[in-house]
Image: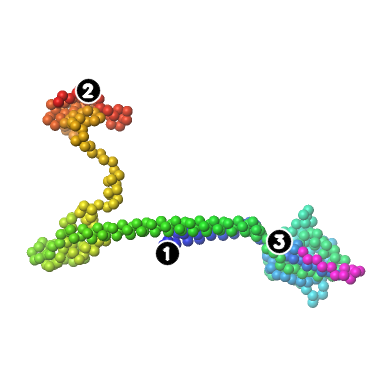
Amino acid sequence: MQSLWGPALSQQRLLLLTVMQVLSLHCLTARCFWTAYINVSFTEPGSNQTGWERSECGVYGQNSPLESVRGLVGYPVSTRPWGCDTDEQYHKPPDHQDWIALMERGNGCTFTEKIQNAAFQGAKAVVIFNYPTPNNEVVQMSHPGTENMIAVMIGNNKGAEILNHVREGISVSMMIEVGKQHGPWTNQYSVFFVSISFFVVTAATVGYFIFYSARRWRVARALTRRQKQLKNEAKKVINKLEVRTLKQGDEEIEADADTCAVCIEPYKPGDVVRILTCSHIFHKSCIDPWILEHRTCPMCKCDILKALGIENDEEKDSEQSAPELTFNNSQRNGLDVRTDIPENAIYTLPSVYGPERATEESPISSEEQYLVNNEGGVNSLPVHIVPYDNPIYEEIDLKKEVKS
């Protein structure tokens, strides 16, 4: 049973491995990303009312840990809060409070440099808003080497709004929460496609296993039935073989005599031996089990069943299906049906009998040969012989009629 499962399971593993490789290659070309919920709260000046906004407008960086963080918003003190200088001053709360650095993308420095400068100033996280774009786009940042620093990018509109509140002296508190995972294989159509593909692969594998198992079972059953049939035939014919008891003076027990090919033991007086159809002898106790299993002579491989007139089913079928090539002479009534040639006339081609006889006889034209009877050519007549491989001329043109 393990041999039946082997090819099917190996094919299933190969198909599953192929699907996983395709998914991995697709994720490399189009990475999955995680969104971030940005919670912003502030006190409106004059009304003493607290404003609160929450939106899924941020995207975690590729190298950022997926964690939540909370703190007041701080920013670089410059005309454009790029945060590219290491010694740049930041508008931030006192040291005992956690704060999140807000800065703008651009000015020729990398995301890694911006995040490292903010971390050097003591920020717990960095929020970078994109430069102005027509669709207020947000991209996933790549910032290797920032260790465990949380980094999120938001759109230009949202970042500029928060920056204006902070520059107006409003204390803005921000909380970053982990959102949802997005990517090419997370929408419902992709999940449906992958499910259908997996179902098709599984169904094909199961179908192949059923077909393969049924075929193996059918072949094994046929072989077992055939072996039992041959073994039963061998049991029937084994008693037809001659059995003899050796005695002193027999040539089989002489010093230079052959040994039993099955047990490799010399023959001794009193041993019971069996003589096969090929005249080879063996110990009866040795050759009987051998014949039941192999049905051949251990020395010359002679087929015992065939030698005793019991043919295999395959040979019988082939003989029955082969066309009969012999003719019934009793139905001819003395003349051939197609050529009307007398029954006692035969062809003699001198060139067939070798070069010696061909040179001794007189030369004969290539277009004429002679028909002679068994009495030495008394009733001979010339006939026209055409090449045997020409399909157009298949009949023999008799030039003269044989006189009876």
Question: Where residue 399 is drawn, which disc sits there?
Answer: 2
Residue 364 position, x and y percent, is 20, 25
Q: Find numbered disc 1 in the image and state the secondary structure of the residue it sits on.
A: helix
- Which circle's residue, 1 or 2, is located before the other in the chain? 1
Q: Quadrant of residue 290?
A: bottom left
Residue density around tag 1, few if under 14, some if 14–19, many if 20 or more, within 10 Å:
few
> Which residues are the magenta region?
44-55
- Number of the label disc, if any, that sits on residue 141: 3
CA gap between label 3 and label 2 equals 105 Å
Residue 389 in sight here: yes
The first of marks 3 and 1 along the sequence is 1
Say if 276 sits above or below 53 in the image: above
- How far apart marks 1 and 2 lie (CA) works out to 76 Å
Screen quadrant of the C terminus? top left
Foreground residue among 270 and 329: 329
Residue at image coords 91%, 69%:
46
**Amino acid residing under circle 1:** Gln
Q: Which residue is mark 1?
A: 2
Residue 363, by quadrant, is top left
Q: In the image, what residue type sits under mark 3?
A: Met
Query: Crowding near pointer 2: few (<14 within 10 Å), some, many (20+)?
Result: few
* Mark toward the viewer: 3 or 1: 1
Residue at the spot x=17%, y=25% of the render? Answer: 402
Q: 133 or 367: nearer the eye?
A: 367
Residue 302: quadrant of the picture: bottom left
Q: Is there CB contact under 8 Å for labels 1 and 2?
A: no
- Residue type at mark 2 is Lys
What percent of the width, then of the height, locates residue 108?
75, 58
Secondary element at image label 2: loop
Q: Residue 389 vs residue 98: left or right?
A: left
Q: Nearer the viewer, residue 58 or 111?
A: 58
Who comes first in sequence, dot 3 or dot 2?
A: 3
